[in-house]
Image: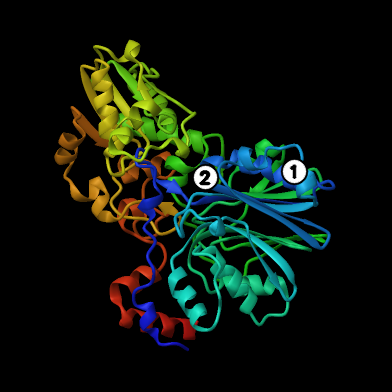
Amino acid sequence: MRSLSHMIHPPVVHREHFRDADDDHPRLECGVCGVWGAPADEASAIVALGLHALQHRGQEACGIASVNQTRFHTERHMGHVGEAFGGTDLPERMPGTAAVGHTRYSTAGGSFLRNIQPMFADLDQGGIAIGHNGNLTNFHFLRNQLVGEGSIFQSTSDSEVILHLIARSRKAKIVDRFIDALARIEGGYALVAQTRTKMIGARDPLGIRPLVLGQLGDAWVLASETCALDTMGATFVRDVEHGEVIVIDHEGLRSIKPFPARAARPCLFEYVYFSRPDSVVNGRSVYGVRKRMGEGLAREFPIDADVVVPVPDSGVPAALGYAQASGIPYEMGIIRSHYLGRTFIQPSQGARQKGVAMKHSPNRAVIEGKRVVLIDDSIVRGTTSVKLVRAVRAAGAREVHLRSASPPILWPDFYGIDMPERDQLIAANKTMEEMRELLEVDSLGFLSVDGLYKAMGETGRNAAAPQFTDHYFTGDYPTRLVDREIEEGGRDAIGRQLSLLVTA
């Protein structure tokens, strides 16, 4: 093995470089979708419909890989699903009865064509295409180890590590090789893989990232959210369980649970922001949870006001809940334009400053002279919030009271969410009063952690055994952060990880 010195400072991808400067919301890495057993040559078109429904999970790039008997057809494009796969000729371009697809927003790796998924590789047993939603917390450790042993990488995405681990496994069967690779990775993931004879789905042992199973006639479907099943016309069967591997082939479907049982801890931000409101995630209606978040916020931070206004679109359900619980009228006081893509982002600071006004326009008719309660799903850095507050005041609001339907974000994420480091998180560096002054509001309130758990149908957070992944609010990370430990701890940390690897 090579010297370990090259592992002390693994390459760091600065995720902020890929961020829309005028959008302060967190971003999720991607969405995945797959179909097995579709009518002849229709698989790619069905997957394209699913990806269209999952567009909110990733808007930088998309890809599909279909298989027709023994031949794979792959296409990967920058841009939206409709632009890449909206043509009626898709079944001719990408024939087959099985396909997997992916829509991407980069968190690990940059915005380059070589990082777009599904990633494809020719193994000794044939081709395999894989789509990955999530982030591996030991990506750099594994990548550097594989490079040191002779592996050659074609991308900077953590998803390629999984392909290399599958290729290097000594197991005889492809499913066993896939499971062998899963045993080496850590973090949050939902995977959909396609070989010429099988579709394989997997969810991380804690169920951090979501994955659902459905049926479309005689075909089986895997997708990140139930909204994709609805768009395809598929029927929801069940959630893929945490730590479960599903194998679908001509003999049917079988479930494998290869790892020790652990309590599930799904990601709370799926409910706060990421999932579409019409999806049902882990048995809970996203829309219903968000409305209850607003109701809890009204109980925890009441205010005498004239109108409740959501920050569209993600703040709408919580604002409805706040209005109903408080008795304050709900109005669409901010109108959002849905026709500004990343291609419209301007390079100059002066042009960027106009970005919020172009995306969110105050509705003066319902704001002027009013005491406004402004409801957003979350507050990250506060850069967008202060611009919106100023715009609402400029439209004549007499008072502005800002409410966040999630608790203060205090810690960064390492499981597939594009979130700034701690020194850029406003709540981690300011007191409540300092935040209120910085955001230029008359009052400020965040839903409590227990309030969020109650919106989820729990009585509160079980500190001894948390029911959800909530580290961005609490600092309680549910897995080891191997790459972060190495980055901060140097050679000693590498030694600890290698010893753990040997004993695993």
Residue ID at (80%, 45%): 92
Please, which residue is most extreme toward the front here?
A: 348
In the displayed structure, 252 sits above or below 318; it is below
Residue 294: mark: none
Q: Residues within 10 Å of mark 1 (few under 14, many from 20)?
A: some
In the displayed structure, 321 sits above or below 15; it is above
Q: Nearer the viewer, residue 380 or 463?
A: 380
Q: Position of residue 135 (x, y in %)?
A: 47, 60
Left or right side of 374 for 134: right
Q: Earlier in the sequence, mark 2 or mark 1?
A: 2
- Residue annotated with mark 2: 57
Q: CA distance from mark 2 to mark 1?
A: 22 Å
- Residue annotated with mark 1: 90
Query: Is residue 253 among the parts visible in the rendering?
Result: no
Query: Is residue 407 among the parts visible in the rendering?
Result: yes
Amino acid on which the number 2 mark rests in the picture: Arg
Amino acid on which the number 1 mark rests in the picture: Leu
Residue ID at (27%, 49%): 425
